Image (cartoon, helix red, strand yellow):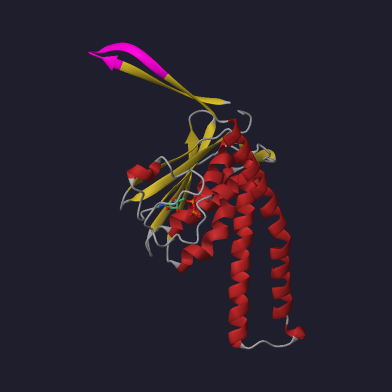
Amino acid sequence: FYSKAVLSIVSKDKVIGSVIILKNITEFQQMDEAKTNFIATISHELKTPISSIKMSLKLLEDSRIGAVNTEQRQLLENIDEDARRLLQITAELLDMAQAETGKLNLHFGSTHPQNIVDYTIKALKTTAEQKHITINVKCAQNLPDVHADLDKSTWVLINLLSNAIKYSHEKSVVDLVVKKHHNDEVEFSVEDHGRGIDQQYLSRIFDRYFKVPGTTTDQTGTGLGLAIAKDFIEAQAGKIGVESELGEGSRFYFTLKMAGKN
Ligand code: ADP
């Protein structure tokens, strides 16, 4: 494979020549594939021992093995939280590697948008309450079913809503809106009134590992969530995007095909 760049040489508004630069990128592509396979293998291999740590922690918490004092319980909870986080990171890495190699396994079915919304709200109710954030759900009347992978679509909406909560100020409002879009799509959107995103970073927000520089709150993030969300939505023939204003808030949206219109 070659990448090509053409430069024109202009003198007095006239093109007097051009330079073509050809670069062999086969080696880069092979390296990229090797990296992706490596990530897939590692994340797969890590899943088992981390799950086993979680199982052992559960056993330790079981009073039949012996009581733990408050301090020890706190330590166990810390380890459990870290193990949960590690599992999430390995799952994200695996999803990303699978998407990159086109091995994403989708299970399509007909589902009502309300199901996706209900699962999402259930998953994040407590997180929102902890920050006293109100989630305003507005589902249009008579929404049609969508042709989608329920788990992956729910994963995307959970990710967008979780970011909205993460980057919102306490006691603010997040709008989750679902409506028909054009003739054959349903649009899900999540709008927050949080810190917003600088225009200069908007085009890179869906890139792998990208995190807006200079932010302190998102140190726990991998910068993979939105990249995977994009893979999941595009694999379902949908579109994903963002509009944002620094200091005002952001609106992330995605579309899914209506059932029967795919
Ligand atoms: P992460 O796991 O780091 O949150 P994401 O891919 O979900 O990764 O997001 C990438 C980056 O985009 C985040 O680190 C954050 O800087 C920015 N971002 C995402 N959602 C929002 C939002 N609703 N408001 C402001 N910034 C956001």
Q: Position of residue 241 (x, y in %)?
A: 45, 39
Q: Is residue 43 left or right of residue 188?
A: right
Q: Position of residue 226 (x, y in %)?
A: 51, 47
Above or below, 10 against 105 in this view is above
Residue 140 in view of the camera: no
Q: Which residues are magenta?
A: 10-19
Residue 131 part of the magenta segment: no
Q: Position of residue 58 (x, y in %)?
A: 71, 74
- Residue name at image x 59 percent, y 50 percent: 155
> Along the line of sight, which residue is nearer the eye, 61 or 200?
200
Q: Position of residue 55 (x, y in %)?
A: 73, 70
Q: Quadrant of the N terminus?
A: top right
Residue 59 in view of the camera: yes
Extreme residue in the left direction: 12
- Residue name at image x 56 percent, y 54 percent: 120
- Residue name at image x 55 percent, y 47 percent: 156
Above or below, 257 against 168 in this view is above
> Along the line of sight, which residue is nearer the eye, 167 or 174?
167
